[in-house]
Each structure stands twice: as C-alpha cells, then as structure tokens.
Image (spheres, rainbow, N blue to C red):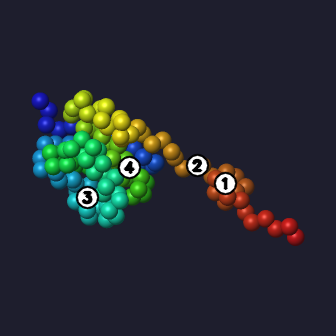
Amino acid sequence: MNDNFLGTGRRKRSVARVRLALGEGKITVNKRPLEEYFTRQTLQQIVRQPLEVTQSLTRFNIDVKVEGGGTSGQAGALRHGIARALVQMDESLREILRKAGLLTRDDREKESKKYGRKRARKRFQFSKR
C-alpha cells in the first residue's frame, strides 16, 4: 500500500500541492509550520476543517507546497487539496467531505478590468460641470 497520498487544491489564483502521510498531525506549509505560515486563527481553522470533519487531526503528517494568490486563497486551496488527498486515501470519506462542501472547487475568480473604467465595475468620478 502507498504511504503517500497526493491532492491538488485550487482557490482564486492559488494552487496547493498536498502530500498526506501517516504520522502524528504535523502540518508543514512551504517548509514552515502551519502556525508560522498562516498566523491568523481563522485561516488555520479553514486548513484543518477537512481533518476535523473526518476526525483525523492527529493521524497524518501533511506536507504542502502552495503558490500564487493571497493568504485567504492559499488557505482555501490548501483545504481543497487536503480533502482531495483524504479521498484518495480512503474513498469512504468522500460522502462526509462532500456533505461538508469541502470537495467542491470554489470557482470564483477576480473579474477582469474593463476599458474606460478604474477596475472591473468602478467608474471614474462623474462631474456634472
């Protein structure tokens, strides 16, 4: 049996490549501990969500390479990647993770800028005179 399980997660412009191995619950993001990489408590909760739902917080060591986007997008991508890796490890977890909405790729992207505008929708200030 394979001892490493892989999962790729995406959110906004971020891509997370996740390697799941049996261990004692260490999560490493870009060769740094999770708490050091994501300093905000909410982002750490987002990352741990798939593990909490499947009651496997201390079962795996997770090694992640994440790139692109900002911290929020990276945390979302990481959550998606962990969920996918868990399913690759144990197919019976699919339904639990699906019910929690953790296997669905959040496909919202930044809307592209339009010509004659400041951003996608913001207009320049209107002056009547």
Name the element at disc 4: helix
Pick whichever, 99 or 113, lies toward us: 99
- Mark 4 burial class by Cα count in 10 Å: few <14, some 14-19, many 20+: many
Q: Residue at x 35, y 59 (%)?
A: 42
Q: Nearer the viewer, mark 3 or mark 2?
A: 3
- Mark 2 burial class by Cα count in 10 Å: few <14, some 14-19, many 20+: few
> Circle 1 sits on which residue?
121
Q: Quick one: label 4 or label 3, which is nearer the N terminus?
A: 3
Q: Which mark is residue 76?
A: 4
Q: Quick one: label 2 or label 4, which is nearer the N terminus?
A: 4
Q: Position of residue 7 (x, y in %)?
A: 29, 39
Whether pointer 1 and pointer 2 mark residues with C-beta atoms closer than 8 Å, the reply is yes
> Circle 3 sits on which residue?
34
Marks 2/4: CA distance?
Answer: 19 Å
- Establish if 45 lies above or below 84: below
Q: Residue at x 70, y 52 (%)?
A: 115
Whether pointer 3 and pointer 2 mark residues with C-beta atoms closer than 8 Å, the reply is no
